[in-house]
């Protein structure tokens, strides 16, 4: 690992890094500790997939070929705007 002199670290530390690992113990924790500015949370799909499977078995119908989920920002978009305005 290369260590930068303190004076050279500041510009790098001010870059707003974003992540796409919104898991509670990694991505979200990294946002809370300041290692990331924000991350994307994609909800777990296992429960939804099981519901779709049960419905397909019960009704004898095929589920849709694609099912989309709604990702969300962590922190919320409104909070990011407030953070940016205060920076």
Image (spheres, rainbow, N blue to C red):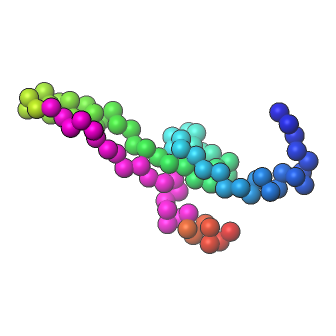
The quarter in which the C terminus is drawn is bottom right
Q: Note whether 38 is above or below 45 in the view shown.
A: below
Q: Residue furthest left?
A: 59
Residue 42 sits in which quadrant? top left
In front of the other: 49 or 66: 66
Q: Note whether 6 is above or below 45 in the view shown.
A: below
- Where residue 81 appears, as percent x and y from the top left, is 55, 68
Asked if residue 46 lies left or right of residue 76, the reply is: left
Asked if residue 60 lies left or right of residue 42, the reply is: left
State how many labels appear.
Answer: 0
Q: What residue appears at the point 53 percent right and 41 percent down from the top-left corner?
A: 21
Q: Note whether 86 is above or below 56 in the view shown.
A: below
Q: Residue furthest bottom?
A: 85
Asked if residue 79 lies left or right of residue 57, the reply is: right
In this rendering, does residue 73 appear at all? yes
Magenta-colored span: 62-80
Q: What residue appears at the point 21 percent right and 38 percent down from the top-left corner?
A: 64
Predominant SS along the magenta part: loop
The quarter in which the N terminus is drawn is top right
- Where residue 20 appears, as percent x and y from the top left, is 53, 44
- Where residue 73 appears, as percent x and y from the top left, is 48, 54
Residue 68 on the magenta span: yes
- Where residue 39 appears, as percent x and y from the top left, is 55, 49
Residue 28 on the magenta span: no
Q: What residue appears at the point 13 percent right and 27 percent down from the top-left corner?
A: 57
In this rendering, does residue 28 appear at all? no
């Amino acid at each position: 690992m290369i260590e930068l002199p303190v004076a050279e670290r500041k510009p790098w530390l001010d870059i707003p890094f974003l992540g796409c690992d919104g898991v509670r113990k990694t991505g979200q924790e990294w946002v809370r500790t300041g290692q990331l500015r924000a991350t994307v949370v994609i909800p777990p799909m296992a429960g939804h997939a099981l519901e779709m499977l049960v419905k397909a078995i019960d009704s004898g119908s095929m589920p849709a070929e694609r099912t989309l989920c709604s990702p969300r920002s962590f922190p919320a978009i409104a909070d990011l705007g407030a953070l940016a305005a205060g920076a």
